[in-house]
């Protein structure tokens, strides 16, 4: 996440007003212009319409556009432009009525439900669900029938029916805001609920409310047009946009152009409301994003170049990596800067470093699965007798599973929640191992047994949410081993697990490595894990390897001051009652920052 | 799973009661009454009062509703104010047409929507932009306007398909299918893009999750990662949207049936509304609500089927 945000590298702009942002978007500005035009033209229809909308001219029936009738005439010779202008007012009135009802109810009920929660909130949620399931059009037909074709009654009902959608959004926005600390602070400071709601909650979610109302307005236009199309609400011959579409439908064979003026007007109006809503939403999102990105950009630091002269790849090694450089897209400073390492047969190499030192990125680069926004600029890998260019990740997919198996930090998140444990294993065995359904099934059970899972038949039938984190990591290991890889890559495999489970997983990994002569690449920030199962350790600092040595030597005689600092920052060695040492403390105390 | 279905059916009861009660309650607030607007009631005061009594309008609202409900539970929805025919018979004659359209829309927009949405999530580019443009058009133009354009192009100009009318599937399956193509398209065009957009967003979100990277790392092919795991997980939020889209498509059938002169529930409801035939409207509302409940039930069942956390 932070990587992606940082790659955008947006300047931390001064907060601009939402309206200015909106006008800065050409589409949204055009949309506002169109709506203003429709509003003015509809209000001034009496003054600017060239004809009376009901005047029939039977000598000029069904004409296309002419100098006398800019948009042509209908089957009774009535001027279409005039009818269009006069038809605007009922449409706009409908929007105002429906929006007023939906806005008042939606905001009032939504905010109070989200603010007070409890039984009142549950009741509202149930009522909202109920109204959402109503067949709206048919309810409107009943209303129109009962209230003698009153468009006013229909539009008020549209507002009522539509308010539930707004209640839903406003309620969840309020819930989110209400859990923030400053609301709690305002309560403690003794502000009344009313003041908190109006000054703090509504002010904060006003953008969301406007977006919702704008999108709702688009729907109201369509409904108003629909009702008048059916000849209800605005009974013919009175002009209405929907009625004009109906008129056009009766002469479709002769004059299809009649569909164009009302259709395009309605479409543009709907579109304008939707675009304004979308534009506002984007402008709001942008505002939050920019604030976040500014922080990340500020946190970036400078790297230290400590790499020595490059050595040739080691042909004896199972995996030999040379000159790995990883960049965040669009940024100068590399995240990993010229990393080399060799992994010997049967060896377990620990890659140790602080968060953000590039450990995980380096191992992900070997299987071509870097997160989006990061790229390998250069790097060669010699594995299984072949050389691979890491900057072209397409060729690396053949390695996955068969040569390099990988397990992840969050074992549960690494499993697809929709499929059983058994499927996770059998699909790999069948697709890449070429096993039949039955053979894959049997092998999957065998793999589960290898990772010390009791009752593997039962576990294979379970879904990820039905097993524990420790078991999920065992499943992850079983999957990584399915195709008998040469190297097992483990990215902080025990960090997310309980301490007792950690030990079990490490035992399991040590046992597997010993019995299969598989090499392991272990990413960790835990010296305990390094001491426990690694043969050699590689210390990474800001993307550069600063020391690599056998584990015993690292602990007894670290060659580099940073390694020593990192070792001293191990919380397991801290004395009770004293502050925990951090790397920065030790590192800076010694004034060794180059 | 069974508990899920039972729950949905239980919460449907208050919905049905609320919908049917609504008409009676609103009717009591309305100025004047139905008897005054019907032709039989307009001859004399005596005729008006007799009609009021016959329709039960002289009783208190709750009593009227109680009567209606009691008879409805026994499969009797009364008689049409306008034609005097039994409401149940009128509705049952029309149900097949509306269901044909709804099922057609469901098939078309789910298959096309999922495919287009997944494609645009992965490829972006042309498919994505086409969906964007179509969804803007689908949102902006009313379905009845789109229906008219479809008639103009495919029936009037190209003469490929009938402009209006309906043939029963029992009379001729081929003509039945042809009479449904344009109505289904008119409704579906809007729905396809809603589902496609939702699928695209969901796919985009799912493809960024950890397990996708883990699946790739395990050596699975891109095809399998995307179309088996990606789409399956993306389908979960999409199913909910399909339900909402189908409910809105049900509303669109009212207009589309009107334009294509299809004898369905929607055109019946419009006729009833034009004639102030409250008894018939009440029946139509009930049927539409039952279809909505069926859609919600189908959504719940498919959600449970797709999501092991709900099922197990």
Image (cartoon, grey):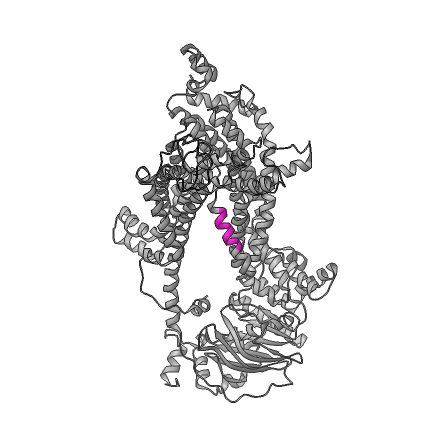
Q: Position of residue A465 (x, y in %)?
A: 56, 56
**Front residue (pair A515, B178):** B178
Position of residue A557 in the picture relative to residue A51 (left or right): right
Residue B2 seen: no
Q: Position of residue A415 (x, y in %)?
A: 58, 61
Q: Is residue B30 above or below residue A218?
A: above
Looking at the image, the residue that sits furthest to the top is B46
**Front residue (pair A13, A54):** A54
Q: Is residue B39 above or below residue A323?
A: above
Q: In this view, does A67 lie above or below A147?
A: below
* Quarter placement of the C terminus of chain A: bottom left
Q: Position of residue B250 (x, y in %)?
A: 53, 38
**Front residue (pair A261, B264):** A261
Residue A57 seen: yes
Looking at the image, the residue that sits furthest to the bottom is A309
Using the rendered view, name the quadrant where residue A537 is placed: bottom right
x 41%, y 18%: residue: B36
- Which residues lie in the magenta part? B130-138
Q: Is residue A327 above or below residue B58?
A: below
**Front residue (pair A145, A183):** A145
Position of residue B66 in the picture relative to residue A468 (left or right): left
Quick check: is A430 in the magenta stretch?
no
Position of residue B121 in the picture relative to residue A280 (left or right): right
Q: Where is residue A436 in the image (x, y as percent from the top left)?
A: 74, 61
Q: Is the magenta stretch mostly helix, strand or loop?
A: helix
Q: How many labels does the image show?
A: 0
């Amino acid at each position: 996440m932070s990587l992606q945000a940082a790659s955008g590298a947006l300047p931390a702009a001064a907060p601009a007003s939402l309206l200015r942002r909106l006008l800065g978007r050409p589409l949204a500005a055009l949309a506002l212009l169109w709506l203003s035009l429709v509003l003015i033209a509809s209000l001034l229809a009496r003054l600017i319409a060239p004809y009376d909308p009901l005047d029939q001219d039977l000598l000029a029936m069904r004409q296309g556009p002419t100098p006398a009738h800019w948009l042509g005439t209908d089957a009774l010779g009535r001027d279409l432009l005039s009818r269009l202008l006069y038809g605007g007012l009922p449409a706009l009135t409908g929007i105002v009525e429906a929006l007023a009802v939906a806005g008042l109810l939606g905001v009032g009920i939504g905010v109070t439900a989200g603010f007070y929660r409890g039984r009142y909130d549950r009741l509202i949620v149930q009522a909202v669900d109920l109204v959402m399931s109503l067949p709206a059009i048919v309810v409107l037909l009943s209303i129109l029938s009962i209230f003698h074709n009153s468009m006013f009654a229909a539009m008020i009902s549209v507002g009522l029916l539509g308010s539930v959608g707004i209640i839903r959004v406003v309620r969840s926005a309020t819930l989110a805001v209400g859990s923030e600390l400053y609301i709690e602070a305002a309560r403690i400071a003794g502000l009344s609920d009313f003041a908190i709601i109006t000054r703090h909650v509504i002010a904060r979610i006003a953008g969301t409310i406007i977006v919702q109302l704008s999108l709702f307005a688009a729907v109201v236009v369509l409904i108003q047009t629909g009702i008048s199309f059916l000849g209800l609400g605005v009974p013919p011959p009175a002009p209405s946009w929907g009625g004009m579409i109906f008129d056009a439908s009766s002469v479709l064979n002769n004059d299809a152009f009649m569909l164009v003026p009302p259709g395009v007007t309605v479409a543009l109006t709907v579109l304008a409301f939707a675009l304004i809503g979308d534009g506002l939403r984007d402008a709001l999102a942008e505002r939050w994003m920019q604030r976040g990105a500014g922080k990340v950009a500020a946190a970036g630091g400078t790297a230290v170049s400590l790499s020595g002269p490059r050595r040739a790849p080691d042909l004896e090694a199972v995996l030999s990596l040379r000159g790995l450089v990883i960049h965040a897209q669009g940024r100068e400073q590399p995240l990993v800067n010229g990393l080399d390492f060799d992994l010997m047969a049967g060896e377990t190499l620990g890659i140790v470093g602080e968060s953000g030192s590039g450990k995980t990125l380096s191992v992900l680069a070997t299987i071509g699965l870097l997160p989006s926004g990061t790229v390998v600029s250069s790097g060669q890998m010699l594995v299984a007798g072949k050389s691979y260019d890491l900057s072209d990740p397409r060729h690396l997919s053949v390695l996955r599973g068969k040569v390099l198996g990988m397990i992840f930090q969050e074992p549960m998140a690494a499993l697809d929640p929709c499929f059983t444990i058994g499927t996770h294993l059998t699909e790999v065995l069948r697709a890449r191992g070429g096993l039949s359904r039955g053979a894959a099934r049997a092998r999957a059970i065998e793999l589960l047994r290898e990772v010390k899972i009791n009752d593997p038949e039962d576990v294979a039938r379970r879904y990820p949410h039905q097993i524990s984190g420790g078991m999920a990591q065992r499943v992850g290991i079983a999957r990584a081993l399915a195709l008998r890889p040469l190297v097992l890559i483990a990215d902080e495999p025990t960090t997310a697990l309980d301490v007792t489970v950690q030990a079990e997983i490490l035992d399991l990994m040590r046992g597997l490595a010993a019995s299969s002569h598989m090499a392991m690449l272990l990413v960790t920030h835990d010296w305990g894990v390094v001491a426990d199962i690694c043969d050699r350790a590689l210390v990474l600092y800001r993307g550069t390897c600063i020391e690599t040595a056998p584990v015993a030597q690292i602990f007894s005689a670290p060659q580099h001051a940073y390694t020593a600092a990192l070792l001293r920052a191990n919380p397991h060695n801290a004395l009770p009652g004293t502050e925990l040492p951090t790397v920065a403390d030790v590192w800076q105390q010694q004034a060794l920052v180059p | 799973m069974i508990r899920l279905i039972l729950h949905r059916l239980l919460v449907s009861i208050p919905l049905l009661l609320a919908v049917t009660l609504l008409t009676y309650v609103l009717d009591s607030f309305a100025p004047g009454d139905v008897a005054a607007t019907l032709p039989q009631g307009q001859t004399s005061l005596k005729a008006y009062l007799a009609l009021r009594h016959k329709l039960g309008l002289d009783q208190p609202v709750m009593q009227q509703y109680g009567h209606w409900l009691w008879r409805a539970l026994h499969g009797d929805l009364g008689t049409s104010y306008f034609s005097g025919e039994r409401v149940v018979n009128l509705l049952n004659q029309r149900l097949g047409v509306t269901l044909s359209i709804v099922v057609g829309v469901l098939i078309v927009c789910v298959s096309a929507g999922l495919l287009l949405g997944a494609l645009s999530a992965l490829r972006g580019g042309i498919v994505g932009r086409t969906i964007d443009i179509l969804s803007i058009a689908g949102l902006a133009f009313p379905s009845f306007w789109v229906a008219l354009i479809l008639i103009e192009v495919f029936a009037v100009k190209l003469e490929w398909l009938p402009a209006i009318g309906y043939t029963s599937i029992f009379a001729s399956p081929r003509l039945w299918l042809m009479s449904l193509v344009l109505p289904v398209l008119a409704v579906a065009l809007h729905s396809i893009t809603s589902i496609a957009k939702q699928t695209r967003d969901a796919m985009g979100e799912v493809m960024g999750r950890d397990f996708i990277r883990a699946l790739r790392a395990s050596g699975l092919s891109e095809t399998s990662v995307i179309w088996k795991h990606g789409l399956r997980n993306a389908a979960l939020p999409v199913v909910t949207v399909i339900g909402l889209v189908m409910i809105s498509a049900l509303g669109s059938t009212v207009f589309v049936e009107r334009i294509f002169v299809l004898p369905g529930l929607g055109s019946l409801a419009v006729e009833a509304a034009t004639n102030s035939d409250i008894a018939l409207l009440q029946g139509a509302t009930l049927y539409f609500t039952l279809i909505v409940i069926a859609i919600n039930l189908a959504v719940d069942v498919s959600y449970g089927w797709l999501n092991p956390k709900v099922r197990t």
